[in-house]
């Protein structure tokens, strides 16, 4: 079992600053991933009350979760950290040549070691159940002065703190990471891995560290962090599961957590992401007949599969959709129908929506299918809902509700006759999203306008 530390609010905050309300949602989502430890930044410029509120939020969502603060290996910071009701702390100092020369005003190796050990003593002196010293830029130090890095790690191990050995520059290739892990694990220290993604190896390098015996690994939601970020929680856990290492990460919640995270923060999943809609979609007709043959097994357990209704649509899918609704077509007829649907998709230059599919099927066969049923196979149609609130009613609450219910995006509108725009799946458990919305806020919504979008 390897422990996962979520650093979305600390490392991720370097990628994008979010307002307090959003940070509280991020804290909740970070805990919901199943992460064992949540790391928050020591407030330098932000309000201390926000940090206190974030600590409480983590504890509310899961009292078992360890909450820690992260600061510089610098006495005033460590002093400030003691003021908060947390389970532990982590402090960092760089030890590589270039960092000591350019950032730390020519600090010597001896000074660096001294300061790290003093920091470890201060952290230990708190009697927290979590204390960690971070040797920033450890990967570069490994490549330039391996002995010094191993010496530092061994010294810190004697002080009984966890030692973080980040690949700050994101320079390690997986083969190098394997050597790095082997050498470091021999010191007997409790190690933490933190890998930047500059060469796109962060997830895999992190998985290698966990497999090789690291005690803790650092991830963020969608891997956000400084530059192009660090390891991404769900894909890293998926790699680990495949490598036979257990974690407490809830892969079954990945789609929901990332959808909400994206809706609250405006950060989108790239199509290259292992859990994006594109990554869960099969287009080729021959692939659609046997989805299991085209996905890693661990991904099938985490992600729902979409069989796109494109111009390559398989007749077997058409057959299956009809059969599930209790209608049988002979093979020839199913093929003809699939050809018609494919032709329509080609003409439109887009995937068909479930409404469009239902319409063609009804016209050609007389069979009436519920579009919500079709969308289970071909993915959700997206609906755009414009909402006009009654005076004195809050569009903010409706916005948050829409996101929690399954919306992809919701924005307050200005300079418009409407107050809010929501992008959401057209159907939710067989019911139109707009109907659920109108039902829930009957007394507060004046009117709505909807359109299916691509
Ligand atoms: Zn970092």
Image (cartoon, rainbow, N blue to C red):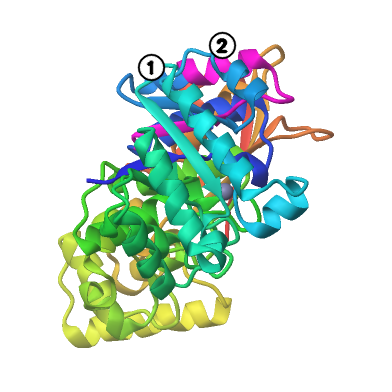
Q: Secondary structure at mark 1?
A: loop
- The answer to whether 405 is drawn above or below residue 124 in the figure is below
- The answer to whether 74 is drawn above or below residue 153 in the figure is above
Task: Kindly identify the residue that appears in the image at 33 percent across and 43 percent down.
Answer: 190
Residue 43 is a magenta residue: yes
* The CB of the residue at mark 2 lies under 8 Å from ligand 1: no
The residue tagged 2 is 83
Q: CA distance from mark 2 to mark 1?
A: 14 Å
| Magenta stretch in the rendered image | 35-56
Say left or right for 450 vs 156: right
Label located before the other in sequence (2 or 1): 2
The residue tagged 1 is 127
Q: Secondary structure at mark 2?
A: loop
Q: In the image, residue 197 lies at what x, y percent?
A: 54, 62
Q: In the image, residue 30 lies at what x, y percent?
A: 44, 35
Task: Kindly identify the residue that appears in the image at 15 percent across and 71 percent down.
Answer: 328
Task: Kindly identify the residue that appears in the image at 41 percent across and 71 percent down.
Answer: 174
| Residue in the foreground of this view, choosing between 231 and 169 | 169
**Label 2: few (<14), some or many (≥20) within 10 Å?**
few
| Residue in the foreground of this view, choosing between 228 and 121 | 121
Q: Is residue 34 visible?
A: yes
């Amino acid at each position: 079992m390897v422990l996962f530390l979520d650093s979305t609010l600390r490392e991720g905050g370097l990628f994008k600053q979010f307002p307090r309300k959003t940070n509280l949602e991020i804290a909740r989502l970070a805990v919901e991933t199943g992460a064992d430890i949540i790391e928050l930044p020591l407030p330098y410029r932000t309000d201390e009350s926000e940090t206190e509120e974030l600590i409480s939020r983590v504890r509310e969502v899961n009292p078992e979760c360890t909450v820690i603060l992260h600061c510089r290996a610098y006495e005033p910071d460590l002093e400030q950290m003691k003021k908060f009701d947390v389970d532990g702390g982590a402090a960092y100092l760089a030890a590589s040549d270039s960092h000591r020369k350019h950032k730390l005003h020519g600090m010597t190796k001896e000074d660096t070691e001294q300061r790290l050990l003093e920091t470890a003593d201060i952290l230990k002196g708190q009697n927290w159940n979590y204390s960690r010293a971070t040797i920033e830029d450890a990967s570069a130090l490994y490549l330039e002065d391996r002995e010094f890095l191993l010496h530092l790690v061994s010294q810190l191990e004697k002080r009984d703190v966890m030692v973080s050995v980040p690949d700050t520059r994101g320079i390690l290739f997986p083969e190098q990471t394997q050597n790095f892990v082997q050498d470091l694990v021999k010191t007997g220290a409790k190690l933490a891995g933190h890998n930047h993604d500059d060469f796109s190896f962060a997830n895999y390098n992190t998985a290698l560290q966990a497999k090789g015996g690291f005690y803790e690994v650092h991830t963020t939601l969608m891997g956000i962090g400084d530059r192009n970020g660090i390891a991404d929680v769900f894909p890293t856990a998926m790699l680990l599961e495949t490598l036979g290492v257990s974690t407490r990460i809830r892969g079954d919640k990945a789609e929901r957590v990332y959808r909400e995270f994206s809706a609250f923060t405006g950060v989108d999943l790239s199509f290259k992401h292992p859990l994006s809609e594109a990554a869960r979609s099969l287009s080729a007709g021959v692939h659609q007949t046997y989805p299991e043959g085209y996905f890693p097994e661990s991904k099938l357990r985490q992600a729902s599969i979409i069989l796109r209704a494109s111009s390559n649509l398989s007749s077997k899918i058409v057959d299956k959709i009809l059969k599930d609704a209790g209608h049988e077509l002979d093979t020839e007829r199913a093929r003809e129908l699939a050809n018609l649907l494919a032709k329509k998709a080609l003409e439109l230059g887009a995937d068909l929506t479930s409404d469009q599919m239902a319409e063609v099927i009804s016209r050609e066969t007389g069979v009436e299918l519920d579009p919500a049923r079709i969308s289970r196979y071909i993915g959700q149609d997206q609906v755009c809902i414009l909402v006009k609130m009654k005076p004195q009613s809050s569009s903010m609450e409706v916005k948050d509700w829409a996101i929690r219910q399954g919306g992809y995006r919701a924005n307050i509108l200005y300079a418009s006759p409407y107050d809010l725009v929501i992008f959401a799946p057209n159907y939710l458990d067989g019911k139109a999203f707009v109907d659920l919305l109108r039902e829930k806020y009957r007394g507060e919504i004046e009117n709505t306008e909807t359109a299916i979008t691509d």
